[in-house]
Amino acid sequence: MNRTRTPALTWYEDMGPGSGGLEPRAWYAGSDAGRMPLNGKWLFRLSPGAATRDESFARPGFDASGWATVEVPGHWVLQGAGGAPAYTNVVYPFPVDPPRVPAANPTGNHLRTFDLPAGWAGDGDVVLRFDGVESCARVWLNGRELGAFKGSRLPHEFAVGGLLRAEGNVLAVRVHQWSSGSYLEDQDQWWLPGIFRDVTLLERPRGAPRDFFVHAGYDHRGGSGTLRVECEGAEGRVLVPELGVDVATGEAVTVAVEPWTAETPRLYDGELVTSGERIGLRVGFRSVVVEDAMQTPYVRPQENGARADLRWAKLTDGSGAGVRAEGGAPIWFTARRWTSEQLDAAEHRPGLRAGETVWVNLDHAVQGLGSQSCGPGVLPEYRLDARAAELSFVFTPLG
């Protein structure tokens, strides 16, 4: 019996997000903890493919004196280091065989040596953060592999405190232009491989938060704001001097405030203080509530939220009084506090004022969305043609 063996996937073709990294987070706020940028000139060597298993460049003492240099953050194809920028719209830049990518997979080895700042306390951990690498990377520090990652537009972090030295640290990064992640990132874009966003060492002292979340809601009826700061990994206090706020993390406090709006972006200076770190806050009080669940508040008002293929619909107030509408055929139902003409005339959300009257639309059919300029046209079952139509309803009072 003949059996066909499927070649094993390489790490950059594997469909997993990577290995060795810390739990994802979006951003580190400015604080008094140490922060060391690793941007600047990096040693660089380009290979035409990704098949090499040679990792000797990642070991301390490797002779890279013959290598070129590139600027980080940057794209090597824009720095004369090999290859060229490529643009695609709706087709992939390589044969489609997910999750596999071509053997001709440009690979850039990057090297950076650095010393730690003299003032770092060294009593906590240190995080190595990459804010963006296209398309994937393996990372070594002082000869030890930290892990690998995909997701070009996502930050990736590694805990490196136990591997750092006061002087002569060697950071090595191998970047492949193509990976299984490339299948998710293709659509009307430039392909520009490299370490194209910041690389940073972040000191994380003992007693510093792992993460925090600021909740700052606004009650427009009384002009008050409610502030609560969640703090993960540490306990501390939240200070907003202008508002007289000094509360423990996790505790809510309500005070009179000016709201944040797009026209008046009012922010209050504050601080999250823990035993290991002081983090500056800029707090704006705002609440966004969809009170009418049938209308999504787009920036440019537009019709949406209709309920389709209904046999009946009813509209009532808090006491249960109202009306029920039933159609002989399935109907489309919407209820809004403005007319269709007001909706069409409003260019921005603030120009759409809700009144006391509820306007109900009962429709036999509604034209679907779509155009063949980009994507499919309207599906046949949702296309309206010019023809006469009759629709009847039965209205029944309620309450």
Image (tube, rainbow, N blue to C red):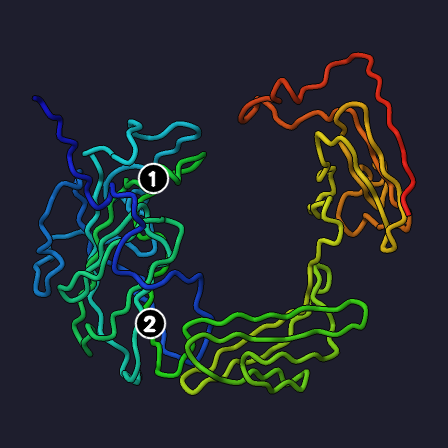
The residue drawn where x is 43% and y is 37% is 189
Point out residue 89 in the picture as x, y percentages from the top left corner. Answer: 44, 30
Q: Quadrant of residue 129?
A: bottom left
The residue drawn where x is 15% and y is 64% is 144
Q: Quadrant of residue 248?
A: bottom right
* Relative horizontal placement of residue 296, taking residue 61 as reference (left or right): right
Q: Which element carries disc 1, helix, strand or loop?
A: helix
Q: Residue reaching furthest front?
A: 399
- Foreground label between 2 and 1: 1
- Out of 5 and 225, give the one closest to the viewer: 5
In this rendering, the answer to whether 133 lies above or below 25 is above
Which disc number belongs to residue 43? Answer: none
Point out residue 1 in the picture as x, y percentages from the top left corner. Answer: 7, 21
Disc 2 and disc 1 in contact, CB within 8 angstroms: no
Q: Label 2 vs label 1: CA separation?
A: 30 Å
Q: Which residue is mark 2?
A: 36
Point out residue 199 in the picture as x, y percentages from the top left corner. Answer: 33, 62
Q: Which residue is mark 1?
A: 182
Point out residue 123 in the picture as x, y percentages from the top left corner. Answer: 29, 84
- Out of 253 and 38, give the one closest to the viewer: 253
In this rendering, the answer to whether 333 lies above or below 210 is above
The residue drawn where x is 45% and y is 74% is 232
Q: Which element carries disc 2, helix, strand or loop?
A: strand
Three-letter code for the amino acid on which mark 1 is drawn: Ser
